[in-house]
Amino acid sequence: MSTILCTRNITVDFDGFKAIQELNFQMKQGEVHFLIGPNGAGKTTLLDVICGKVKPVQGEVLFKETIDLTNKQEHEIVRYGVGRKFQAPAIFVGLTVFENLELSMKQNRGLLSTLRAKLTDGERAVIGKQLAMINLEDRANDKASSLSHGQKQWLEIGMLLMQEPELLLLDEPVAGMTQTETEKTGKLIQEIAKSRSVLVVDHDMDFVRKFSDRVTVMHEGKILCEGTITEVQEDSRVAEVYLGRRKEAVC
Ligand SMILES: Nc1ncnc2c1ncn2[C@@H]1O[C@H](COP(=O)(O)OP(=O)(O)OP(=O)(O)O)[C@@H](O)[C@H]1O
């Protein structure tokens, strides 16, 4: 498997505080890779660096081994094939589920002209396929505002997928979800990873256990250890950094 993403010696400095320190991280193509670690470990900051929201003071981020994302703007990074989902869903609640997906497909037109333009059969089929993937086929014509919390998250994932990213970054995608929604989200991520790579930040250890291919544990801006979830859980350093904070999380 080739490497989809690799960071070399990344350091992020927030006014003298190093949120990430000389970090060398890599993930393989087609992997569901989880980033875990105690609060403040630097997980979200790493996603911010990959998507161009935060610029490191040193190091580089290589996408598909050759594209250096470090000096690219956020919108360019999206075009290169990196999609980022933030914790709060960024959907248009006044539009239908179908329209939200339609809008995501046609970024080069304005909002009104996109909604007035006639879709081709091919485009309808693409949206239909996406609706099935995110389990919202029967909600296509409902306003996004009427969806449950979990369904809104899936809709946003569907919107990101309309851009055909090769790497999808998900920040705590199951936060606030019911057990059933969490389970469906895990299955959706596994389905996505059949054709793309997915990097997920999450605290829900049952979720990580069930759906990760590989796990990286971060602590104080560095990588503490990496491996399968079983390997990571057996590492005494991991138990140590969680002690007194979320001991139960690694047991
Ligand atoms: N814009 C910023 N300015 C200053 N400090 C920041 C900024 N963003 C993050 N930090 C600090 O950097 C550290 C890493 O934050 P980050 O959000 O990446 O951690 P995290 O591992 O995602 O934590 P959590 O699990 O709580 O979300 C924290 O100490 C945080 O307070």
Image (cartoon, grey):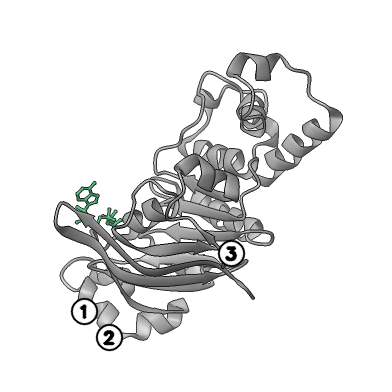
Is the residue under label 1 in contact with that under label 2 (CB below 8 Å)? yes
Tell me how far mark 2 sits from mark 1, CA to CA: 6 Å
Whether disc 2's CB lies below 8 Å from ligand 1 is answered no
Is the residue under label 1 in contact with that under label 3 (CB below 8 Å)? no
Q: Amino acid at mark 1?
A: Glu
**Residue 83 x/y as whole percent:** 53, 47
N-terminal-most mark, 2 or 3 = 3
Q: Which residue is mark 3?
A: 64
| Dot 2: element | helix
Res 31 quadrant in image: bottom right
Q: Residue at x 57, y 37 (%)?
A: 155
Q: Which residue is mark 1?
A: 240
Instruction: Give the number of the mark in front: 3 or 1.
Output: 3
**Residue 36 x/y as whole percent:** 36, 66
Left/right of residue 242 with respect to residue 10 in the rendered view: left
Left/right of residue 242 with respect to residue 204 in the rendered view: left
In the rendered image, the vertical position of residue 124 relative to residue 48, given as above or below: above
Q: Which residue is mark 2?
A: 236
Numbered disc total: 3
Instruction: Give the number of the mark in front: 2 or 3.
Output: 3
**Residue 122 x/y as whole percent:** 83, 34
Q: Residue at x 45, y 47 (%)?
A: 178
Q: Amino acid at mark 3?
A: Lys
